[in-house]
Amino acid sequence: MERGHSISAAERVVQRQLDAYNAHDLGVFVATDSDGVALHRIPSTTPAISGKAALTDFYRDSRFNLPALHTALVHRSVVGNKVVDHERISGLREQPVEAVVTYVVIDGLIQSVWLASAQ
């Protein structure tokens, strides 16, 4: 017998960010992040983007200006305050980009993002 899926607080904030990403709503998108958010591109342990201001600038200038930008959620796993998404990102390149993204949520905000892409 399958049990109903209860959405955790961590999953709720990540889903809010994903919805804002697909709507190109920068204000809602960055509102889900802590002021000290860090985005890492695996395998580097040094953040590619540090802080909400830098994240805002990057998504405003390099992502939300792309009209075809959209992410499809392929699969999601949630373990405590970690949300791991397999995403298929369209609108960045000619072909969709496959990515695995791990979000760490603390106190209702995304604290860190770990991104690994196939390309």
Image (cartoon, rainbow, N blue to C red):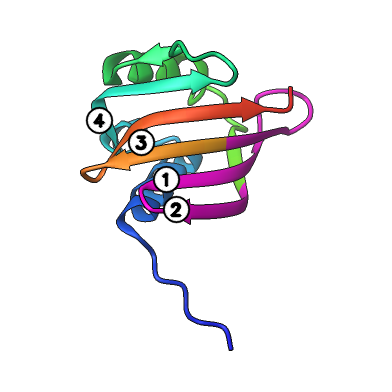
Helix, strand or loop at disc 3? helix
Q: Are marks 3 and 2 in contact (CB under 8 Å)?
A: no
Q: Seen in the image, is 53 located left or right of residue 60?
A: left
The answer to which of 48 and 45 lies nearer the viewer is 45
Helix, strand or loop at disc 1? strand
Q: Residue furthest right?
A: 95
Q: Earlier in the sequence, mark 3 or mark 2?
A: 3
Helix, strand or loop at disc 4? strand
Q: Earlier in the sequence, mark 4 or mark 2?
A: 4
Q: Position of residue 62 (x, y in %)?
A: 51, 16
Main SS, magenta region, reads strand
Task: Name which quarter of the figure residue 118 lies in.
Answer: top right
Bounds of the magenta span?
73-100
The alpha-carbon separation of the residues under discs 3 and 1 comes to: 18 Å
Q: Point out the image quarter for the C terminus.
A: top right
Location of mark 3 (residue):
29
Location of mark 2 (residue):
79
The alpha-carbon separation of the residues under discs 4 and 2 comes to: 20 Å
The alpha-carbon separation of the residues under discs 3 and 4 comes to: 11 Å
Q: Earlier in the sequence, mark 4 or mark 1?
A: 4
Q: Are marks 1 and 2 in contact (CB under 8 Å)?
A: yes
Mark number, residue 34: 4
Kindly report which numbered mark, 3 or 4, lies closer to the viewer in this rendering.
Answer: 4
Q: Earlier in the sequence, mark 3 or mark 1?
A: 3
Helix, strand or loop at disc 2? strand
The amino acid at mark 4 is Ser
Q: Point out the image quarter for the N terminus.
A: bottom right
Residue at position x 34%, y 48% in the image:
13
Kindly report which numbered mark, 3 or 1, lies closer to the viewer in this rendering.
Answer: 1
Location of mark 1 (residue):
82
Residue at position x 36%, y 48% in the image:
81
The alpha-carbon separation of the residues under discs 1 and 2 comes to: 5 Å
